C-alpha cells in the first residue's frame, strides 16, 4: 500500500510504502472492538462509593425501648430506614472491578489493525517533517487547514521532547486536535478520532518498533526490554546533573593528607 506523504503546506511530496500483512492483512472489526472496549473500561476511575450501615458515623444506642411504646422495633439510628442512615446496597466500586486485559500479541495486533482501517479509509495524514520553528497555534491551525481536515484529528508527536516542544505548544489549544506520543498509538485513540497526523519518521519507527512483534518473539526476544532498562536508569542519572548556576562542591581532603 502506497500512502501519500505531505508537507506542512498540504502538498504531496512523495509516497510511503506500508506492508498490509504487517498490519494484519485485512481489517478485523471484532478484534478492534475487543481492544477498544478494554482500553475504554481501563479508563474508568472506579470511585463510586456510598456508606453502608457500619460506615455511617453515629451512636449505636437503641433509640427507644423494644416494647411498650406501640411503635415498630428499631435499634441504632444508622439503619437504612432513617434519614442519614446507611444505604441498603451500598456502592463500593474500585478500578479493579472494571479492569479488562488482553494478551500482548492480540493487543498489539489490534493497534496495528486499527491503523490499517484508517489507512484503507485514507484518514492517515503523513507529514514529511512536523518540526515547527516556533510555538504558534495559528501556524498549526494552518497546517490542519492545508490538509483539509474537517473532523477532529489525533496528532502523534515525536518521542523526543525537544523535537516536539514547539508542535506540542502549538496544537494543545486547538479544540479539534488531540496530542499523544507516537509510540503510544492505540486502537482506542485511533478509533476516537477521524484523522491521524503523524511524521513519516515517527510512523516508520512505530511500525518497526516493539509493537511489530505480534508473534512468539514478543515473549522470547522482546524489543522493548532494553528501552525499559534505559528508562529505569534515567532517574539515577539526573541526580548527577547540576542546575544552572550550581557549582560542584570541592573535594574534601582525606585524613592522611596535610592541611
Image: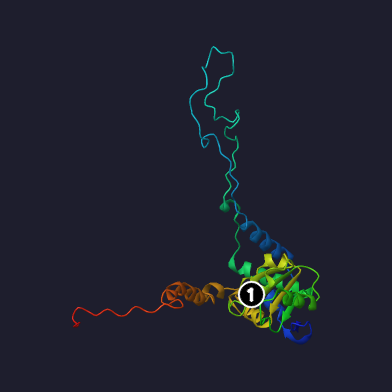
Name the one closer to the observer, 154 or 227: 154
Residue 176 image position (x, y, % from top left): 74, 67
Question: Which of the 4 quarters of the picture holds residue 243?
Answer: bottom left
Residue 205 image position (x, y, % from top left): 62, 80
Classify 219 as above or below 15.
above
Q: Is residue 25 visible?
A: no
Q: Which residue is pictured at 68% across the width and 74% down the height? A: 170
Question: Which of the 4 quarters of the picture holds residue 238?
Answer: bottom left
Name the one closer to the observer, 208 or 43: 43
Q: Is residue 211 left or right of residue 145?
A: left
Q: Which residue is pictured at 52% across the width and 22% down the height? A: 63
Question: Which of the 4 quarters of the picture holds residue 133?
Answer: bottom right
Query: In the picture, which quadrant includes the C terminus?
Result: bottom left
Q: Which residue is pictured at 68% across the width and 66% down the height? A: 189
Q: Is residue 150 visible?
A: yes
Q: Which residue is pictured at 63% across the width and 74% down the height? A: 182
In the rendered image, which residue does mark 1 sit on? Answer: 182
SS at mark 1?
A: helix
Crowding at mark 1 (Cα within 10 Å: few <14, some 14-19, many 20+): many
Residue 247 image position (x, y, % from top left): 39, 79
Amino acid at each position: 500500500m502506497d500512502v501519500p506523504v505531505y508537507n506542512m503546506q498540504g502538498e504531496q511530496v512523495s509516497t510511503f510504502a506500508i506492508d498490509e500483512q504487517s498490519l494484519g492483512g485485512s481489517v478485523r472489526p471484532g478484534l478492534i472492538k475487543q481492544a477498544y472496549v478494554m482500553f475504554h473500561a481501563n479508563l474508568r476511575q472506579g470511585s463510586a462509593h456510598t456508606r453502608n450501615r457500619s460506615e455511617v458515623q453515629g451512636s449505636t444506642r437503641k433509640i427507644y425501648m423494644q416494647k411498650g411504646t406501640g411503635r415498630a422495633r428499631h435499634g441504632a439510628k444508622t439503619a437504612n430506614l432513617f434519614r442519614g442512615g446507611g444505604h441498603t446496597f451500598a456502592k463500593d466500586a474500585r478500578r479493579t472491578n472494571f479492569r479488562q486485559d488482553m494478551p500482548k500479541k492480540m493487543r498489539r495486533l489490534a493497534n496495528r489493525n486499527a491503523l490499517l482501517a484508517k489507512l484503507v479509509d485514507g484518514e492517515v495524514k503523513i507529514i514529511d517533517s512536523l518540526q515547527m520553528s516556533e510555538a504558534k497555534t495559528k501556524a498549526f491551525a494552518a497546517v490542519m487547514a492545508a490538509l483539509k481536515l474537517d473532523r477532529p484529528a489525533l496528532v502523534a508527536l515525536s518521542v523526543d521532547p525537544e523535537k516536539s516542544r514547539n508542535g506540542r505548544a502549538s496544537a494543545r489549544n486547538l479544540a479539534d486536535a488531540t496530542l499523544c506520543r507516537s509510540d503510544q498509538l492505540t486502537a482506542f485513540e485511533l478509533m476516537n478520532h477521524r484523522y491521524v497526523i503523524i511524521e513519516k519518521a515517527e510512523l516508520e519507527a512505530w511500525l518497526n518498533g516493539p509493537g511489530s512483534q505480534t508473534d512468539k518473539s514478543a515473549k522470547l526476544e522482546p524489543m522493548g526490554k532494553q528501552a525499559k532498562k534505559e528508562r529505569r536508569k534515567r532517574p539515577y542519572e539526573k541526580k548527577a546533573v547540576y542546575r544552572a548556576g550550581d557549582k560542584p562542591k570541592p573535594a574534601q581532603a582525606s585524613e592522611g593528607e596535610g592541611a
